């Protein structure tokens, strides 16, 4: 019987370092994706909080037309800003900055307010309760004036490295028509 040659073993190359190299290449990409996902969640939560704060302020300003009578305008605007800043602070916005913690005024988010009527707008604080010839303090003004509040918030990302920006501006507007609402009996 003839002797057979020994069976050839399959040729194996050493791939022991390949997995480590692949892991080292993919780890930064995966980490960047995870951080971007976390930032997106924080961004969404912050945008909702800023919008809620703007709605709180505009709703307060639109509750009664007499809030816009000449002696009440400054107090109304101060209370609107107070409500917006308290709502923003209560939402635990990262980067919230208060210019006066005692009176709850804030600089991040920043507060602006306009009264609008018939396509015209004027700054709430200097309006005296009027937009052009419309008296916003009168419940008979038809159509009613609109209280427009805008909050601008600077959102800071976790990592300010490319392709992620270091910060984003979130601006939220809220508009309510002034209407004299009576509290429930």
Image (spheres, helix red, strand yellow):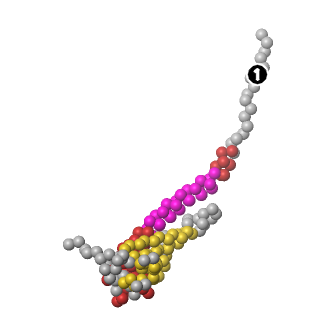
Give me the residue at 66% from left, 52% from top: 25
Disc 1: which residue: 6
Question: Residue 109, position in %: x, y?
Answer: 48, 75
Q: Is residue 30 left or right of residue 93?
A: right
Q: Is residue 122 left or right of residue 37?
A: left
Give me the residue at 45% from left, 82% from top: 122
Query: Where 78 sits versus 174, above or below?
Result: below
Which of the pair 70/153 is nearer the observer?
70
Q: Choose top left, top right, bottom left or bottom right for residue 124.
A: bottom left
Give me the residue at 49% from left, 74% from top: 152
Which of the pair 159/122 is nearer the observer?
122
Q: Main secondary structure of the magenta part?
A: helix
Query: Where 178 sits versus 164, above or below?
Result: below
Question: Residue 3, position in %: x, y?
Answer: 78, 15
Farthest left residue? 185
Q: Quadrant of the C terminus?
A: bottom left
Q: Secondary structure at mark 1?
A: loop
Question: Residue 52, position in %: x, y?
Answer: 41, 69
Q: Choose top left, top right, bottom left or bottom right for residue 80.
A: bottom left
Farthest bottom residue? 71
Q: Is residue 44 magenta?
A: yes
Residue 179 visible in image: yes
Q: Is residue 67 left or right of residue 127?
A: left
Question: Residue 64, position in %: x, y?
Answer: 31, 79
Give me the residue at 66% from left, 48% from top: 22
Please give the range of residues in magenta. 26-50
Which of the pair 146/102 is nearer the observer?
146
Q: Quadrant of the N terminus?
A: top right
């Amino acid at each position: 019987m003839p002797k057979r040659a020994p069976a050839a073993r399959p040729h194996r190359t050493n791939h022991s370092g390949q997995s480590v190299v692949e892991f080292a290449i993919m780890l930064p990409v995966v980490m960047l994706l995870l951080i971007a996902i976390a930032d997106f969640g924080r961004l969404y939560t912050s945008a909702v909080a800023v919008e809620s704060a703007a709605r709180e302020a505009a709703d307060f300003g639109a509750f009664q037309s007499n809030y816009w009578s000449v002696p009440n305008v400054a107090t109304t605007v101060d209370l609107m800003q107070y409500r917006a800043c308290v709502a923003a602070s209560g939402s635990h916005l990262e980067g919230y900055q208060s210019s006066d913690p005692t009176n709850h005024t804030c600089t991040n988010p920043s507060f602006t307010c306009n009264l609008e009527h018939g396509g015209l707008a004027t700054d709430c604080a200097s309006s005296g309760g009027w937009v052009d010839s419309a008296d916003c303090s009168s419940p008979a003004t038809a159509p009613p004036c609109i209280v427009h509040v805008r909050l601008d918030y600077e959102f800071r990302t976790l990592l300010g490295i490319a392709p992620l920006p270091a910060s984003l501006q979130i601006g939220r507007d809220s508009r309510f028509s002034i209407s004299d609402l009576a509290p429930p009996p």
